[in-house]
Image (cartoon, rainbow, N blue to C red):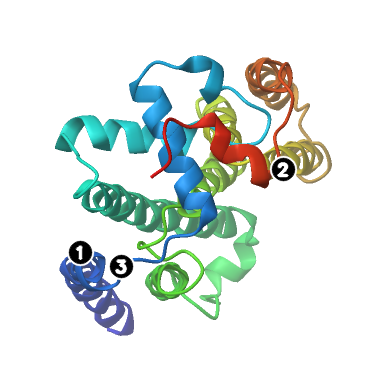
Amino acid sequence: MRSQTLRRALLVYLALLIPIAWLSTKFERYQMDGDGMACMDIADLMRAHHWAGVVNGYWHPLYPAGLALAQRLFHTTRMNELHAYYVLNYIIFLASVVAMLAFVTSLDKLRKRMTPSADQNAGAGPLLGLNALRLLGVGLVVIASQRELSMAQVRPDALLQALMLAAFAMLLQSLATESLIFTPLLGFFFGLAYLAKSFAFVVALLTIAVMMLFQALLQRRRPGLVIAGGALWRWWSSRRFQDRTSLRSPDRSTASTLATPAR
C-alpha cells in the first residue's frame, strides 16, 4: 500500500514538474555572467565555422555546440537568442531528471543483487524503497536547478550533471547485470562529460578504477571487459585533449578575444 502511494506521488510530481520547470524559464531570467558570454561567443564562432577560435585550451565545446544548434533551430537574433538558450537548458534539465531516475533504478538493482538471499527470504527490506529514492533524487535535481544550476544561467554545469548521472547509471547497471553493453556506454557518457567540462576526466578515471576493483574483489571476476571499455573511452578523450592543448590556453581576461565582435 505504501509503495503504491509513493508511486502515485512520484507520477504526480513528475507530471507537475514538466510545466512548472517550463514556467521557471519564463520568469527566472537574466543571470548572465562572463562564462555565459564566452559560451555564447564560441557558439557564434561555430555557426560561422571559425574553428581556430572554437578549439582552445580553456572552453570546452559541447555546451557551445548545443547553443549553436539552438541558434540554428530558432533562427535567433541578438534580441531573442536568450529564449533559445533557455529552451536548451530546459531540455538539459529534463535530461537530468531522466538520468537521475536511471541512476536510482540502477542503484536499487545493484542493492537487490548485493542483498543476501537469507535477508530477502526473511522479508527484510531497505529503509527507503525504489519510489522513495526516486522522489528524493528528483527532488535534489530540482533543488539544484533553483540554485547553482539554474536554467537561467548559460553555463555547462547542468549538462555536466546530466551526463555524469547517466555515466554513473551505466556503471551501476554494469555492476548489477554484468552486461557487456553498459561498459562502452559508461565510457561514452564520460567522454561527452569531458567535452562539457574537464572535471569529468578525473572522476572518470576514479570511477573506472572503482569498477575494476569491485569486479575483482567482490564479484570475483576478471575485469577484462571493464578495461576494454575504459581503454576505448581513454583513447577518445586523449585525442580531444591533444587537439585542445595544441594551442595556447587563454585566461578569462582574453577569452573574449576569441569571439566575433563583442556583444
Left or right: 141 with respect to 230?
Answer: left
Viewport quadrant of the C terminus: top left
In the image, which disc is placed on residue 234? none
Q: Which residue is mark 3?
A: 29
Residue 1 position within the rendered picture, expressed as x and y whole percent measured from the top left: 27, 84
Q: CA distance from mark 3 to mark 1?
A: 12 Å
Residue placed most toward the observer, 263 or 60:
263
Residue placed most toward the observer, 181 or 66:
66
Left or right: 107 with respect to 199?
Answer: left
Q: Which residue is mark 2?
A: 207
Q: Which residue is mark 1?
A: 22
Callout 2 crowding tier (Cα within 10 Å): few <14, some 14–19, many ≥20? some
Q: Amino acid at mark 2?
A: Thr
**Mark 3 or mark 2, whichever is nearer to me:** 3
Can the viewer see residue 162?
no
Residue 227 position within the rendered picture, expressed as x and y whole percent measured from the top left: 74, 23
Q: Amino acid at mark 1?
A: Trp
